[in-house]
Image (spheres, rainbow, N blue to C red):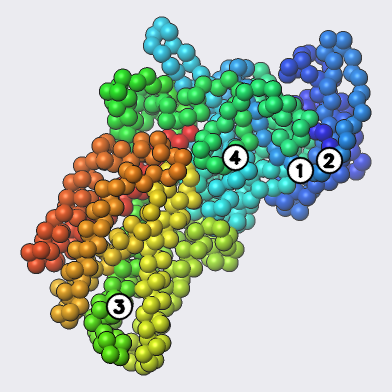
Amino acid sequence: MGRDLGRVADYTCSLGGVRTRPVECGGKSLYGLRERLWGWDSVLPNGLGGSDWSEALRVPKSLLDCDHASGLEPLQSPPKKRDICVQLGFVIDHSRCIGCHACTVACKSENDVPLGSFRTWVKYTEQGEFPSVRRGFSVLRCNQCEKPPCVDICPTSALGKSANGVIEVDPNNCIGCKSCMHACPYDALYINPSSGLAEKCHFCAHRTEVGLAPACAVVCPTEAIIPGDFDDPDSVVSRIKQERQLEVRKPEAGTVPNVFYADVSAAGIDPGLTNQSHGSIWSEDLSGERADAESFRAAETKAREESSARTVYDVPRKMLWGWKITGYLWTKSIAAGAFPMALLAAWSSADPSTGTLEFGASALGALLISLIFLALTGLLLVLDLKRPERFLYILLRPNWKSWLVRGSYIIGAFGGLLVLALVLGLYGLELGRVPTMAITVVLVALGAATAGYTGFLFAQAKGRVLWMRRGMWAHLILQAGVAGSSCLLLADSLGLALDSASSEFMRLALGVTLALHLLMTLFEGKLAPKNRESEYRRTSHLITHGPYKVSHWGVGVVAGILLPMALLSGGLTVPAGVLALVGLWTEEDLLVRAGQVLPIS
């Protein structure tokens, strides 16, 4: 079933018996071709398309060529039918793009995109020095990926791939968690400030349903934006893909994008090759951390005597996650570490002949610490949502591919077992040796899972390569050990009254976990995710050598690891615990902030 959603200049449509008017032959169209609607074929289920989720997707049967040279309109026979398989996408020909922003304006007007947000935008880059300066344009947007990471990470299945291959957002399910924005390597999603919901390019679904091309393609004065079906070998986009050398953005991310670029400069689609510290035209200059990061990168490039392109026009971007996510990581470390560390201390002093665990008031205090900080963890997560009243959707409408969902159930199971242990402790209920040991093992395992699942969640954020660090789950478990033992030593000084064996265990545990934490920290630069090494190196270098180096080395490493280890050897457990917690907050805060500071589009 040959078809192409190309430029449809004019048509009429009646849903009760569809009528079409062919595109008139007159001026020259793309590559000397004339295209018109042949007719309509049978209905496709639309899946996630349109305002009515049960509505059908109408697909034009074919758009036939018209002989420009002769001015004739030879009617060709409809191509043979094939199995319905549609993947809509774009070819963007930058040999034609003039950087006029007509596509951006049309998209905003057609889809009511709010001020400051964009579904498609044009970036300007410049290379060379005056008078030999060359400016390039790059039209950026959602890539309608075949393996979309935004769909996998969305906890409520608000994002999905429709029958025509387009990724769409169901506003009825979105909770505004912003995880999809971090998962997208192309910066293609935004949160509507009015609704608090995620939005993105949906290929003008309301137009494609009735055979119209997306608004951006219709208004492009040079026909640089060519939409079509890549699963149709006879479509214009498929023919261009076969005949010309095309490029995609970030193929190393493994998303299999369906926006292809012809004759685009490498700097236009690879943000790692450009720098924004030189100022810009017509757009807002960078400020704060992002300006510092770009200035550092510019200085490094100059020191290596490498040439760098300049980004002179781009849309503004904000850091999406801040202190609430840092707080979530920090409180979760304490919650996941406090009671499990107390259990391990009790386990280490168990009677070897019976395996009996002795729990006292100190264990009850550790349990309360874990429960309080686990509640704070959940509160911070809910408060960070743009639609916090929908937080239960994570449990009621779960997408089991998302580690946000898996993590929520892990936290729920851990919290439920903590409450059970609290009830047993308060009422002095005896379960016997085997049940007690079983609960102990499960609690320690759930504590480790509560600490470590965020490493797998961050690995799904393919737009933030620093967070994809290999082995992060193990590092987070070690950090939970640091946080838990530090809190218990501090609580002991405030009256928790750890017995001598437990106190000695906590000092030893804090020293060991700090040493392993230091080892993991020093080797973070070697733990880049596969195929993303250069991008990872640029970001991690900001922490170790760039604008964050004082906080990292001075507070995170020296004050937060080395000094506590020295204090522990001198028996000063309280200041050691305080400094370890401060250093932990610093390192987790740097992870959150540095991961978002460099442009990804």
- For label 2, the SS is loop
Location of residue 2 with respect to 355 vertically, above or below:
above
Dot 4 or dot 1: first in sequence order is 1
- Where residue 490 appears, as percent x and y from the top left, is 18, 69
Distance between the alpha carbons at the discs numbered 4 and 1? 16 Å
- Residue 306 image position (x, y, % from top left): 35, 21
Q: From mark 3 to mark 1, how far is it between C-alphas?
A: 56 Å
Query: Identity of the amino acid at label 4?
Result: Val
Query: What's the residue type where badge 3 is placed?
Result: Leu
Label at residue 343: 3
Q: Which mark is residue 256?
A: 4
Q: Position of residue 301 (x, y in %)?
A: 32, 25
The reply to whether the C-beta atoms of the residues labelled 4 and 1 are less than 8 Å apart is: no
Quadrant where the N terminus lies?
A: top right
Counting every numbered tag in the picture gives 4
The residue depicted at 39 percent of the width and 8 percent of the height is 130
Residue in view at x 82 percent, y 28 percent: 63
Earlier-in-chain disc, 3 versus 1: 1
Which residue is rendered at x = 49% and y = 51% of the image?
460
Identify the residue at the far left of this view.
570
User: Sequence-wise, which precedes: disc 2 or disc 4?
Assistant: 2
